[in-house]
Structure formats: C-alpha cells, structure tokens
C-alpha cells in the first residue's frame, strides 16, 4: 500500500492510498492524533454511497461522528454554505476540541477544509477524497477556499489536513465526465513534472465510458500515489506559494479559472476548464517559452484521448474571461506570473505575458483542433 509522507515540520502528515481504505478511516484518523467528536462533511451524492462505511469505521475506532450533508456541486463552495456549516457544527457540539472529516470531491474538501480553518478559529480535519480531482490533487497541500462572484477560490486559507485517506475503489461510482475532468489535473502533473505519465493516462481513455477494468483498479493506487508524490514534493518546498514553485501547479489555471468563472459555477467542471486553460497555455508556451510543437502535441493528444473539451463553448466572450482572470492570485504589481512549459515535463514562470497575449490564446480556443 503506498503511503506518501508530506514533510512540513509540525504540520507534516501522511497520505494513505489503498483500495478499500474507506473501512480503515477510523484507524488512520486515530493514528494521526485525531479523537473525540468528528463532523463528517459530505454531499448529497456521496452521502448515500459512502457515509455509512466511514461513520462505522470512525465509531469502531472510538470517535463520536455526526453527519453534515451539503448539496452536490460547485455552487456549495460559497460563503453562505460555509456559514451554514459552522452553525450546524456548533449545534452538533463540534467545539475547539472537535474535528472534521471531509468526505467527497474537491468541492467538499475545499469547503470543509475552509470551515475547519475558521471554525472556532481553526480545528483539525482529515481528507477522504472520492473523485479523481480530489485524489490526485485537491486533498493534498492545504489550499482551502470558497468562490465569490468575482472569481474562483478568492476567499480561503492554507490549512493542512492531519491525514489524507484515499480509497481509489470509490471512483467506480463516478460518471465518465467527472472521471475525465479529474484526469485533466493528472495531465497537468505530467506536463509540469513527469511526461512519462502521459502514456499511462492516455491508456485510461477507452475505459472511461465502459468503467475501469479490474486490472486498472488494481493499478490505480500507484498512479494516484505518483500524482500525490509530485504535488507533495512541490508543497514541501513552497507551502504558501511564495517561492514561485507551487505556482507551477497552477499550469492551465489562469485562463482555466477565467473560463470556469465566466459561466455560472458548475456549468463547466474545474478539470474541463483546466484542460481548456492548458491548451491556451501550450499555445503561449510554443510562442514564448520555446516549447516544441511535438511536445505540445504530446500533451494535447493525452487531453484528446480523455475526451476533454478543448474548444471554447459557443458564445463565450473573450473580454469576460479576461476580466475573470484579473483576480488571479498570481498577479504581482499588476503583472501576471503565467506558467509556461519549456518542455513536456518542465515548467517555469513568465512575467511577460500580456492581456493581449492571453486574448490571442483564448481566441485560439475557438479553432477546432486538428
Ligand atoms: N484545493 C486544491 O488544491 C484544489 C485542487 C484541484 C481542484 N480544486 C477544487 O476542486 C473542485 C472540483 O472538485 P471535483 O471535480 O471533485 O468536484 P465535486 O466535488 O463537485 O465532485 C464532482 C461530482 O462527483 C460527485 N461525487 C464525488 N465523489 C463521488 C463518487 N465516488 N461517486 C459518485 N459521485 C461522486 C459529487 O457529488 C459531484 O456531483 C473545484 O472547486 C476546484 O476549484 C481544489
Ligand atoms: O495546490 C495548488 O497549489 C494548486 O494550484 C492546485 C490546483 O489544481 C487547484 O485548482 C487550486 O485550487 C488552484 O489554486 P488557486 O490558488 O489558483 O485558487
Ligand atoms: Zn485545479
């Protein structure tokens, strides 16, 4: 069973990746030093599938769990939902000695993590991710946030979990679209750090609509662990994104977040927007960072194999997308720090990308890919 340790001094934690790990959540939580009252925060889709197993496991390990269910979907990542959850937790007796278990996708993880960061000025929490986005990316690294109309993740906190428990078998209940969007974040990891992973990711394409084979399910823990390790090593070096290294995890996100926020939240899924953002960033990388056409093609063909959207939705306004990128947290003194690739597997930051460059890249997204 792969266990990846993320070393951050007193905020260090383990990430356990194991098929069937859902039934060991209690044991892992206890070993990580959590105890007492624990609020399981989950959503309306995940609750009927997995909440009971998690509750049982926590109870067997001596915890006193309560269950808190939010509506499924990106719209729940809101200030209003965060406030409602805080009130619910107070009523359930989760005081500063309590803790939270975030059971679900990136929405639940970001929202419950944010609530954990602010409830009674901060309580511990654990991540139990159940989507690919959450298993390869959002459950690790301590970025928690909610959205506001002005942009994605603009209100949040860095708050590291005490432990992450990943059970890849939970992915079997996901639909094709949600599986594919999650793999976009894995393609991002391959693009910035490990191009050899592209081959394994592409192979998943044909299985997305028919469901993962038993052979694939057996291999998922290693593939997920590879992604987690890439992210963990980056976070260890730049937890708060001040050193210019963690920003590399934002490859595809500047324009991606602009596209995601240009329509009502949840219309375009996060990974879908990131796939579009990566296509735009590849276009700029070829022109401004010397990325070869063949390396760009390699990454695009992985996104195509996963059937991710790579052309802009009809009617989406370039200026609106650009306006939504204006609140990107990578702006410093009015200049965007834009993540570009120099090669497949190697990324860097450019301070030279202008609004006009971004507009050109967004226009490129209107052209069908050949
Ligand atoms: N904090 C970070 O570092 C980070 C990284 C990447 C993405 N994110 C955030 O994550 C969010 C996207 O996460 P997501 O794609 O997981 O979306 P999500 O949490 O909305 O999950 C997608 C859908 O799948 C359902 N679902 C979850 N697990 C399931 C399962 N096992 N079986 C059946 N259905 C299941 C959910 O109810 C939801 O309808 C975005 O808000 C994005 O900004 C954060
Ligand atoms: O963990 C990070 O750092 C990332 O950038 C991971 C991204 O996939 C994720 O979408 C993150 O929430 C974006 O960060 P933001 O700071 O641009 O909101
Ligand atoms: Zn992301």
Image (tube, rainbow, N blue to C red):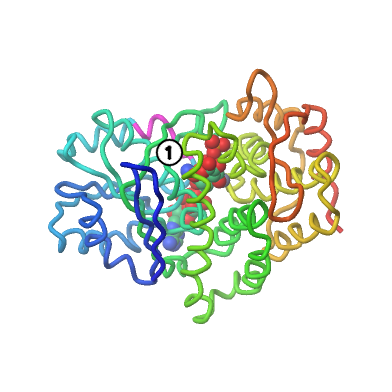
- Kindly identify the residue that appears in the image at 38 percent across and 30 percent down: 80
* Helix, strand or loop: magenta stretch: helix
Assess whether residue 76 is covered by the magenta stretch. yes
Mark 1 vs ligand 1: CB below 8 Å? yes
- Residue 205 falls in which quadrant of the image? bottom right
| Residue 319 coordinates in the image, percent (x, y) | 75, 28
> Is 185 displayed left or right of 93 in the figure?
right
Q: Is residue 313 visible?
A: no
Vertical arrangement, residue 27 with respect to residue 147, above or below: below
The residue closer to the viewer here, 161 or 56, is 161
Residue that label 1 marks = 144
| Circle count | 1
> Looking at the rendering, in which quadrant would you find the N terminus?
bottom left
Which residues are the magenta region?
75-82
Assess whether residue 26 is covered by the magenta stretch. no
Vertical arrangement, residue 59 with respect to residue 341, above or below: below
Q: Is residue 208 visible?
A: yes
| Residue 346 coordinates in the image, percent (x, y) | 69, 50
- Kindly identify the residue that appears in the image at 66 percent across and 30 percent down: 325
> Is 21 displayed left or right of 262 in the figure?
left
- Residue 177 falls in which quadrant of the image? bottom right
Residue sitting at the far top: 333
Disc 1, SS: strand
- Mark 1: give few (<14), some (14-19) or many (20+) Cα within 10 Å: many
- Kindly identify the residue that appears in the image at 70 percent across and 32 percent down: 321
> Is 75 displayed left or right of 248 in the figure?
left
| Residue 281 coordinates in the image, percent (x, y) | 74, 43
> Looking at the rendering, in which quadrant would you find the C terminus?
bottom right
| Residue 179 coordinates in the image, percent (x, y) | 55, 62
- Residue 145 falls in which quadrant of the image? top left
């Amino acid at each position: 069973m792969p266990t990846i340790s993320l070393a951050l001094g007193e905020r260090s934690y383990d990430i356990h990746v194991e098929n069937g790990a859902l039934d060991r959540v209690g044991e892992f939580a206890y070993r990580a030093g959590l105890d007492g009252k624990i609020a399981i925060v989950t959503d309306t889709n995940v609750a009927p599938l997995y909440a009971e197993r998690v509750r049982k496991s926590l109870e067997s390990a001596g915890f006193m769990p309560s269950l808190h269910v939010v509506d499924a979907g990106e719209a729940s990542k809101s200030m209003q939902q965060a406030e409602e959850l805080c009130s619910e937790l107070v009523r359930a007796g989760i005081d500063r000695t309590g803790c939270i278990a975030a059971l679900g996708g990136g929405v639940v993880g970001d929202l419950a993590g944010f609530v954990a960061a602010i409830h009674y000025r901060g309580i511990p929490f654990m991540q139990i991710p159940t989507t690919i986005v959450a298993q390869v990316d959002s459950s690790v690294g301590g970025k928690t946030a909610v959205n506001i109309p002005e942009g994605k993740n603009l209100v949040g906190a860095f708050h590291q979990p005490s432990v992450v428990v990943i059970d890849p078998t939970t992915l079997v209940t996901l639909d094709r679209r949600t599986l594919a969007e999650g793999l976009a974040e894995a393609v991002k990891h391959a693009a910035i750090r490990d191009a050899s992973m592209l081959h394994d990711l592409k192979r998943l394409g044909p299985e997305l609509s028919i469901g993962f084979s038993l052979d694939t399910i057996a291999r998922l823990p290693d593939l997920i662990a590879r992604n987690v390790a890439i992210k963990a090593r980056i976070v260890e070096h730049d937890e708060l994104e001040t050193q210019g290294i963690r920003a590399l995890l934002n490859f595809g996100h500047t324009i991606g977040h602009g596209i995601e926020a240009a329509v009502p939240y949840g219309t375009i899924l996060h990974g879908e927007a990131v796939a579009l953002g990566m296509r735009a960033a590849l276009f700029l990388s070829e022109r401004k960072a010397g990325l070869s056409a063949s390396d760009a093609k390699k990454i695009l063909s992985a996104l195509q194999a996963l059937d991710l959207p790579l052309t802009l939705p009809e009617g989406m306004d370039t200026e609106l997308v650009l306006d939504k990128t204006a609140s990107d947290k990578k702006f410093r003194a009015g200049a965007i720090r834009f993540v570009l690739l120099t090669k497949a597997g190697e990324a860097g930051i450019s301070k030279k990308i202008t609004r006009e460059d971004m507009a050109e890249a967004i226009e490129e997204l209107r052209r069908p890919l050949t």
